[in-house]
Structure formats: structure tokens, C-alpha cells
């Protein structure tokens, strides 16, 4: 699953973005990748390891909901991975 969220502030500030991605790792766990920053500027990437897909998906949904409350909007949603 991959989500791209964007927040366009008013004035001369650069638009901000957040990308949330789920990926399986080589040992049976799941990674939640959170990338955030200004479009065209510096970004940061955080990785969270989760033991299984349902907990990783719950963490992704919680992160998405937190960003929606901050005024971000979902621009792209590339679907959910198949349950393993």
C-alpha cells in the first residue's frame, strides 16, 4: 500500500507532503515507511518495523488519520497489499 498526502499552505510557503508505504521485509515482518518534507526541498524518512501485516496496516491508518486531521489531503492511494 502506498499513500501520498499533500498540504498546500497559503502565501509563499512551499507545499508539504507525506508518503506512507507498507513493504514486507525479508524476515516475515512489515515495514512502514514515512517520508515527509516540502515539495522540492529537504525530506526525512522514518522506518518502523511491525511483526505482521495487520499491525503495520493499523499503524499506517493511524498515521494517515493524524495527517488528515492536520489538514493534509490524500492525492494518491495505490491500494492495499494482499494479505499473507
Image: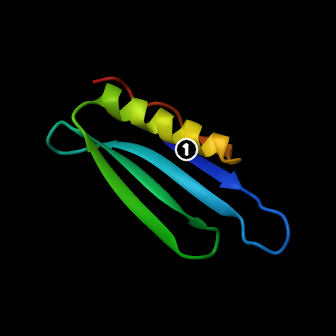
Choose between 46 and 80: the one closer to the eye: 46
- Up the image or down, 47 lies above or below 54; here it is below
Mark 1 burial class by Cα count in 10 Å: few <14, some 14-19, many 20+? some
- Up the image or down, 84 lies above or below 76; here it is above
- Up the image or down, 23 lies above or below 57; here it is below
Q: Position of residue 55 (x, y in %)?
A: 32, 29
Choose between 25 and 56: the one closer to the eye: 56
Q: Is residue 33 left or right of residue 26?
A: right
Q: Position of residue 73 (x, y in %)?
A: 70, 44
Q: Quadrant of residue 38?
A: bottom right
Q: Is residue 11 left or right of residue 52?
A: right
Q: Position of residue 18 (x, y in %)?
A: 56, 54
Please give the name of the residue rendered at 63% of the width and 49% of the height, measured from the top-left corner. Answer: 5
Please give the name of the residue rendered at 85% of the width and 70% of the height, measured from the top-left corner. Answer: 11
Figure disc tally: 1
- Up the image or down, 56 lies above or below 84; here it is below
Please give the name of the residue rendered at 25% of the width and 30% of the height, measured from the top-left corner. Answer: 52
Label 1: which residue?
A: 3
Q: Position of residue 76 (x, y in %)?
A: 63, 44
Amino acid at each position: 500500500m502506498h499513500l501520498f498526502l499533500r498540504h498546500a499552505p497559503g502565501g509563499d510557503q512551499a507545499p508539504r507532503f507525506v508518503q506512507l508505504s507498507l513493504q514486507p521485509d525479508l524476515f516475515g515482518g512489515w515495514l512502514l515507511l514515512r517520508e515527509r518534507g516540502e515539495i522540492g526541498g529537504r525530506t526525512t524518512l522514518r522506518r518502523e518495523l511491525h511483526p505482521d501485516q495487520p499491525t503495520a496496516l493499523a499503524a499506517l491508518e493511524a498515521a494517515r488519520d493524524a495527517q488528515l486531521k492536520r489538514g493534509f489531503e490524500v492525492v494518491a492511494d495505490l491500494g492495499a497489499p494482499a494479505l499473507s
